[in-house]
Amino acid sequence: MINQLFPNVKWDKMWDATYETIYMTGISTIATFVLGLAIGILLFLTSPHQLWANKLSNFIIGAFVNVFRSIPFIILIILLIPFTKFLLGTIRGTNAALPALIIGAAPFYARMVLIALREIDKGVIEAAKSMGAKTSTIIWKVLIPESMPALLSGITVTAVALVGYTAMAGTIGAGGLGNLAFIDGFQRSRDDVTLMATIIILVIVFIIQFIGDFITSKIDKR
């Protein structure tokens, strides 16, 4: 039945492409969480009336975030081709897509981190400061735990966006379902290949969203 509905689909290629999409999404999501969290915390701490308040630093970090989150992803991939080639020696394949995926998503997530941190009750931070807590202690014991539900919700949204980014990266040879849909589907007029790749991408997105929402609901005690 499935073979009749999707006669042109080569399932070994489809599963390989699925693995490549999951690989790119997984690695880039982890790296984006770490990098975006660090940038977001720096943005928060250097903002007015915070522990490391510094207008110049805050402006520079904020400008970096705003510039890179504003560039359309497909253009960002092209701009980063020289950097990617220098870093990895190639611009094709799943690993070659990772720099663009991370650089494209981390500033987006950093802004979500900043929003999450701003929602923390200032009294909690002031109480920690009054007890002589170090900045590192405030970060690890106050800022991150207090904002964790919002941080997880934000990385879920970012991971979903990254699935879409991998599909765009596939159009320039990064592999994955986007590449398969474009090369084997669109360019060869095989609509069933494109449709199946789209269905699998949707399933991946639904799974990511379900897991993210489930974990967030478990740790959110409000």
Image (cartoon, grey):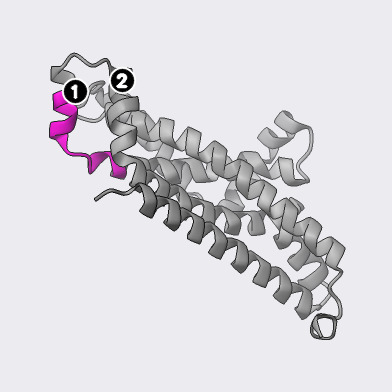
Q: Secondary structure at mark 2?
A: helix
Report the front residue among 183 and 136.
Answer: 136
Given the image, on which type of amino acid does mark 2 rest? Thr
Report the front residue among 29 and 40.
Answer: 29
Whichever of labels 1 and 2 marks the residue nearer the N terminus, that label is: 1
Q: Which residue is mark 2?
A: 137
109 left or right, relative to 119: right
Residue lying at 35% horizontally and 28% vertically, measured from the top left: 42
Whether residue 75 is visible, yes or no, is yes
Residue 30 located within the stretch drawn in magenta:
no
21 left or right, relative to 122: right
x and y percentages locating residue 36 in the rendered image: 45, 37
Residue lying at 69% horizontally and 41% vertically, measured from the top left: 81
Quick check: 27 above or below 178?
Answer: above
Residue lying at 40% horizontally and 40% vertically, measured from the top left: 110
The answer for how far apart the CA atoms under marks 1 and 2 are is 9 Å
Q: Quadrant of residue 66?
A: top left
Characterize the local packing of mark 1: few (<14), some (14-19) or many (20 or more) Cα atoms within 10 angstroms: some
Q: Secondary structure at mark 1?
A: helix
Q: Quadrant of the N terminus?
A: bottom right
Quick check: 180 above or below 152?
Answer: below
Task: Give the main secondary structure, helix, strand or loop, of the magenta stretch.
Answer: helix
Characterize the local packing of mark 2: few (<14), some (14-19) or many (20 or more) Cα atoms within 10 angstroms: few
Residue 125 located within the stretch drawn in magenta:
yes
Over which residues does the magenta segment extend?
A: 116-127
Q: Which residue is mark 1?
A: 128
Given the image, on which type of amino acid does mark 1 rest? Ala
Residue lying at 74% horizontally and 53% vertically, measured from the top left: 19
For the residues labelled 1 and 2, say whether their Cβ atoms are less than 8 Å apart.
yes
